């Protein structure tokens, strides 16, 4: 059975868009899938309740007009970037994800208006996974509304694109395992890539392990899917588990890391830090996350 047919890519601006487009192109070529690019325009009318007291009706209208012009400009920039990338890479453009052929890679761009996190979550629910454009700033990664909309409101996995376009297709995969339900969800989500990868490694560390299946049971599960994997225990780096995990990925020359996201509460990780937050802020390879 074909495991990946539709990939969602919400884009908010042209920042880091080339890396997201490149990863999306690699994915749809690998699976003969469809890349559904969406851009959510802000509704200028949403500004009025936020404008505050002391502003006249004319001033609010001026703010709404300026916001609308900026939104149109951003949409045009994204359309141009999409068209240029599709043309340069020979991608077939279709009208929408509902009319794409299933025997070759295709792409579409849809511009919508509304609440961005809500719209992204809705579309992600009917996508095999969602590719998230890297927000670039460390603080923005930790609070990325698009990423958290997918993780917490879609029931589907997300892949955070790196800042720099990847040079190669995904051949070597690391799977972070700590026995949690989140890690199990990520394990299931990465099977499509692991089934055709050259090398797969399951990474585990005593500092993050929870009650659950052992790493050896994970290897047995993968073997049932005809996926051969080895295991590696990794230590923290400078008492930082996330840093140690990324070093283990670098040592393996991994092209993709799959991991559960926010095994501890999101609020705790945002305030105190945590493995998920460190990975999001410092990873230089694509990261598949599931919650």
Image (cartoon, rainbow, N blue to C red):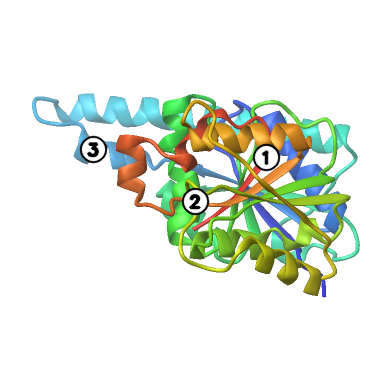
Question: How many discs appear?
Answer: 3
How far across and down, in percent of the image, does residue 38 sit? 60, 47
Residues marked 1 and 3 touching at CB (< 8 Å):
no
What residue does disc 3 label?
48
Using residue 39 as the reference point, say whether residue 71 is left or right of it. left
Secondary structure under tag 3 reads: helix
Kindly identify which residue carries mark 1. 286
How far separated are the C-alphas under marks 2 and 1?
14 Å
Residue 104: x and y in percent read: 90, 58
- The answer to whether residue 139 is left or right of residue 74 is left
Of the residues under marks 2 and 1, which one precedes in the sequence?
2
Location of the N terminus by quadrant is: bottom right
Graded by Cα atoms within 10 Å as few (under 14), some (14 to 19) or many (20 or more), the crowding at tag 3 reads some
Choose between 234 and 117: the one closer to the eye.
Answer: 234
Q: Secondary structure at mark 1?
A: loop
CA gap between label 1 and label 3 equals: 38 Å
Q: Sequence order check: which comes first, mark 1 or mark 3? A: 3
In front of the other: 1 or 278 = 278
Label 2, residues with CA under 10 Å away: few <14, some 14-19, many ≥20: many
**Rounded to the nearest whole Å, what is the CA distance between mark 3 and mark 2?**
36 Å
Q: Are marks 2 and 1 in contact (CB under 8 Å)?
A: no
Number of other residues with Cα within 10 Å of mark 1, as a class: few under 14, some 14 to 19, many 20 or more? many
Picture coordinates of residue 62 (x, y %)? 29, 25
Q: Find numbered disc 2 in the image and state the secondary structure of the residue it sits on.
A: loop
Determine which residue is flagged by label 2: 261
Residue 80 is at least partly visible in this image = no
The residue shown at (75%, 47%) is: 173
Q: Tell me what residue is drawn at x 81 percent, y 45 percent.
A: 172
Which of the two discs, 1 and 3, sits closer to the camera? 1
**Residue situated in front as seen by the camera: 277 or 88:** 277
Residue 135: tell me if it is visible: yes
Q: Residue at x 49, y 51 (%)?
A: 261
């Amino acid at each position: 059975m074909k495991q990946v047919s539709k990939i969602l890519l919400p884009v908010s601006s042209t920042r880091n868009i080339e890396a997201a487009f490149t990863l999306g192109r690699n994915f749809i070529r690998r699976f003969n899938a469809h890349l559904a690019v969406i851009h959510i325009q802000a509704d200028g009318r949403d500004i009025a309740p936020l404008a505050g007291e002391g502003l006249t009706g004319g001033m609010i209208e001026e703010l709404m007009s300026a916001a609308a012009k900026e939104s149109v400009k951003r949409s045009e920039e994204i359309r141009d970037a999409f068209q240029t990338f599709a043309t340069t890479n020979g991608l077939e453009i279709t009208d929408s994800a509902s009319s794409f052929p299933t025997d070759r890679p295709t792409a579409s761009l849809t511009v919508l208006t509304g609440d961005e996190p809500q719209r992204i979550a809705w579309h992600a629910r009917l996508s095999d996974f969602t590719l998230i454009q890297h927000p670039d700033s460390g603080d923005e990664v930790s609070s990325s509304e698009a990423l958290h909309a997918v993780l917490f409101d879609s029931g589907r996995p997300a892949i955070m694109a790196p800042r720099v376009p990847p040079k190669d297709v995904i051949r070597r995969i690391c799977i972070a395992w700590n026995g949690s339900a989140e890690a199990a969800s990520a394990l299931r989500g990465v099977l499509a890539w692991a089934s055709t990868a050259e090398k797969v490694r399951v990474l585990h560390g005593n500092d993050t392990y929870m009650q659950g299946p052992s790493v050896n049971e994970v290897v047995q599960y993968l073997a049932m899917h005809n996926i051969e994997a080895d295991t590696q225990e990794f230590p923290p780096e400078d008492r930082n588990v996330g840093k140690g995990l990324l070093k283990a990925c670098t040592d393996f020359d991994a092209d993709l890391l799959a991991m559960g996201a926010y095994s501890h509460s999101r609020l705790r990780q945002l305030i105190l830090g945590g493995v998920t937050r460190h990975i999001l802020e410092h990873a230089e390879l694509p990261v598949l996350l599931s919650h």
